[in-house]
């Protein structure tokens, strides 16, 4: 059996989500675990990939591919898969990777299972369904198998391997793959880690009461070394940018720690965060649904508790 | 110009899985997937007062006609329903083949999708359909403009926004932030009944039964289980911020600080 992992990068950094999937691939126990990197200047990232378990790294080095567009990546992955006979292809979900995975499925007539949170060594995927009220075991009837994993499903763990075998690949792009072009970008500056990559997320909801109170979430996140998330309600109200939105129409995250400040826990939000390892919530409404899936629920005023908690954490860390 | 909008009829409520077929139970009441209403709205906005045609396309059981009627009531001009018992249980590969074949016959300048299906949480179909049609695809469109034969999309990503241009014909999946879908007017609802409505079989779209439904699918559902239970949940009542220490102790115990 052979496994290929699509590694996504932003700037000159490999995305933690895809390194988590690579770590998982290496743990499946296969001899042939390879990664594929596509873009400009990506060859320099190959040794990073080796640290997370790739024995071989396919490098499709092309400056024209640096913009994050899915279709040329479908061409690149299809070539690597077909020429080398990879049976299983794994991707960490993102705006880019979802489109790559689905385009690849159609190109290769290959089965795609998405929103997986785990994969067993006999290649059964685990997919939460119906607002995560049920876990579905899914399989593939043919190869190649394509699997797209929910963000944060696996920790990225460096195993410290040596230099990988680097295979440079050049690709002939399909005509239709080259028609879309990125002509501009507006990148949002973020102080800390992005919410998909963060081990700790402090998220705020309506219960914070006012946009200014988001500083409570920001200060607690800073003290904990985490990122700030938000509910749809506060994003819609303009209190916080969309890039921080967690939930059905935002991001799905599963950090080690999720701290919910003034969040009621509506189903649309729940689906975005309930697979977090540990959930701590503070809400003044004792009947808020969030307490049903919190490991520690605190009934109280977030404006009183959050600053004290921030202070205690700072003291402990100093 | 012709704009096709792909829509899905989804079960109302939280949904249940039929243990015998291992599929989502679609026997109850259903409705237009609300994310698809954004795609219908965007098509109607692009059409404006022009003589462009908006065609809504769905794959599903006969009852999916209800959702297509809703899109017609919003203002779409024509509906196409691909409905065939042999298509039930189609996975992504099979669905993209069926929709791709139907869309190829329609040959629209622009194909629109909503950002996800509220039942299966799928958010990938457009890229597979675009590949079948060999057209450029842009997803997560927060803004969409057309200038002659070129479309310009502001795409939401994890890092901010990309502005993407592509020539028509193209496939675009719109985010639900792109617009506020209109409600059908009474006049629209009455008028919808008279609008052209085609129901197509697999043979009509030119796909073999072996390429559709479970036979044509490359993935399968094997089993169901309850989600892993959370450990012992604790709940404390705060008084004047005194729980901060309890939270810190909990985080220390869990080795999170």
Image (cartoon, coloured by chain):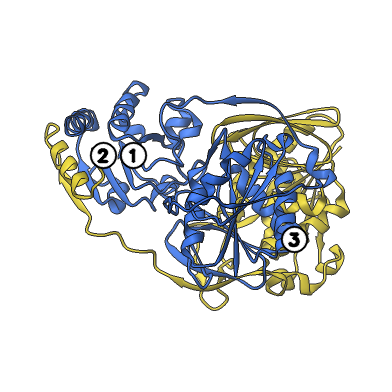
Chain colours: A blue, B yellow
Q: Which residue is mark 1?
A: A263
Mark 3–mark 2 CB contact (< 8 Å) = no
Is residue B102 shown to the viewer in this render? Answer: yes
Between marks 3 and 2 in the image, the one whose residue lies nearer the viewer: 3
Please identify the quadrant where the N terminus of chain B is shown.
top right
Mark 2–mark 1 CB contact (< 8 Å) = yes
Answer above or below: position of B20 versus A111.
below
Q: Chain of mark 1?
A: A
Q: x, y (%) of residue B133?
A: 82, 51
Q: Nearer the viewer, residue B50 or A128?
A: A128
Residue A283 marker: 2
Mark 3 lies on a secondary structure that is: helix
Please identify the quadrant where the C terminus of chain B is shown.
top left
Give the mark nearest the N terminus, 3 or 2.
3
Q: Quadrant of residue A200?
A: top left
Residue A83 marker: 3
Between marks 3 and 1 in the image, the one whose residue lies nearer the viewer: 3
Packing grade of label 2 (10 A; few <14, some 14-19, many >=20) is many
Packing grade of label 3 (10 A; few <14, some 14-19, many >=20) is few
Say which residue appears at 50% left-offset and 54% top-offset. A21
Mark 3–mark 1 CB contact (< 8 Å) = no
For the residues marked 3 and 1, what is the alpha-carbon distance in whole angstroms?
A: 50 Å
């Amino acid at each position: 059996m052979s496994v290929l992992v699509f590694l996504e990068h932003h700037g000159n950094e490999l995305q933690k989500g895809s390194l988590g999937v690579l770590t998982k691939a290496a743990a499946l126990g296969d001899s042939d675990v390879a990664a594929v990197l596509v873009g400009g200047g990506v060859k320099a990232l190959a040794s990073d990939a080796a640290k997370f378990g790739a024995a071989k790294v396919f490098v499709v080095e092309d400056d024209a591919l640096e913009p994050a567009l899915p279709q040329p990546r479908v061409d690149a992955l299809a070539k690597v898969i077909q020429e080398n006979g990879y049976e299983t292809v794994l991707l960490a979900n993102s705006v880019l990777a979802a489109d790559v995975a689905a385009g690849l499925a159609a190109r290769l007539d290959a089965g795609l299972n998405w929103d997986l949170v785990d994969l067993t060594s006999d290649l059964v995927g685990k997919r939460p369904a119906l607002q995560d009220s049920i876990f579905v075991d899914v399989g593939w009837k043919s190869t190649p198998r394509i699997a797209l994993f929910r963000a944060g499903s696996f920790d990225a763990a460096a195993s410290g391997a040596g230099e990988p075998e680097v295979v440079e690949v050049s690709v002939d792009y399909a005509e239709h793959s080259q028609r879309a072009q990125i002509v501009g970008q507006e990148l949002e500056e973020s102080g800390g880690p992005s919410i998909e990559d963060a081990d700790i997320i402090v998220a705020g909801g309506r219960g914070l009461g006012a946009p200014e109170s988001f500083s409570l979430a920001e200060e607690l996140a800073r003290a904990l070394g985490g990122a700030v998330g938000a509910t749809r309600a506060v994003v819609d109200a303009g209190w916080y940018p969309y890039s921080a939105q967690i939930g059905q129409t935002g991001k799905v995250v599963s950090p080690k720690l999720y701290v919910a400040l003034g969040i009621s826990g509506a189903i649309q939000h729940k689906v975005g965060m309930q697979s977090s390892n540990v959930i701590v919530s503070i809400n003044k409404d004792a009947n808020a649904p969030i307490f049903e899936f919190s490991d520690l629920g605190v009934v109280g005023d977030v404006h009183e508790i959050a600053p004290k908690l921030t202070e205690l954490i700072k003291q402990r860390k100093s | 110009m012709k704009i096709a909008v792909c829509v899905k009829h989804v079960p109302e409520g939280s949904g249940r899985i039929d243990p015998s077929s291992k599929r989502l139970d679609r026997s109850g009441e259903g409705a237009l997937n609300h994310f698809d209403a954004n795609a219908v709205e965007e098509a109607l906005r692009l059409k404006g007062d022009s003589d462009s045609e908006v065609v809504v396309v769905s794959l599903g059981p006969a009852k999916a006609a209800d959702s297509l009627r809703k899109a017609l009531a919003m203002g779409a001009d024509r509906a196409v329903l691909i409905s065939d018992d042999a298509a039930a249980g189609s996975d992504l590969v099979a669905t993209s083949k069926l929709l791709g074949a139907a869309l190829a016959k329609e040959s629209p300048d622009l194909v629109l999708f909503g950002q996800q299906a509220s039942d299966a949480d799928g958010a990938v179909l457009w890229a597979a359909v675009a590949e079948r049609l060999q057209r450029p695809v842009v997803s997560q469109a927060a803004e969409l403009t057309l200038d002659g034969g070129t479309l310009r999309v502001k795409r939401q990503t994890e890092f901010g926004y990309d502005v993407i241009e592509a020539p028509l014909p193209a496939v675009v999946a719109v985010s639900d932030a792109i617009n506020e879908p209109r409600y059908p007017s009474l006049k629209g609802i009455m008028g919808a009944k008279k609008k052209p409505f085609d129901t197509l079989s697999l043979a009509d779209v030119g796909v073999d039964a072996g390429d559709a439904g479970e036979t044509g699918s490359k993935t399968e559902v094997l089993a169901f289980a309850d989600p892993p239970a959370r450990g012992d949940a604790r709940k404390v009542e705060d008084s004047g911020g005194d729980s901060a220490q309890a939270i810190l102790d909990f985080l220390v115990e869990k080795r999170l600080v």
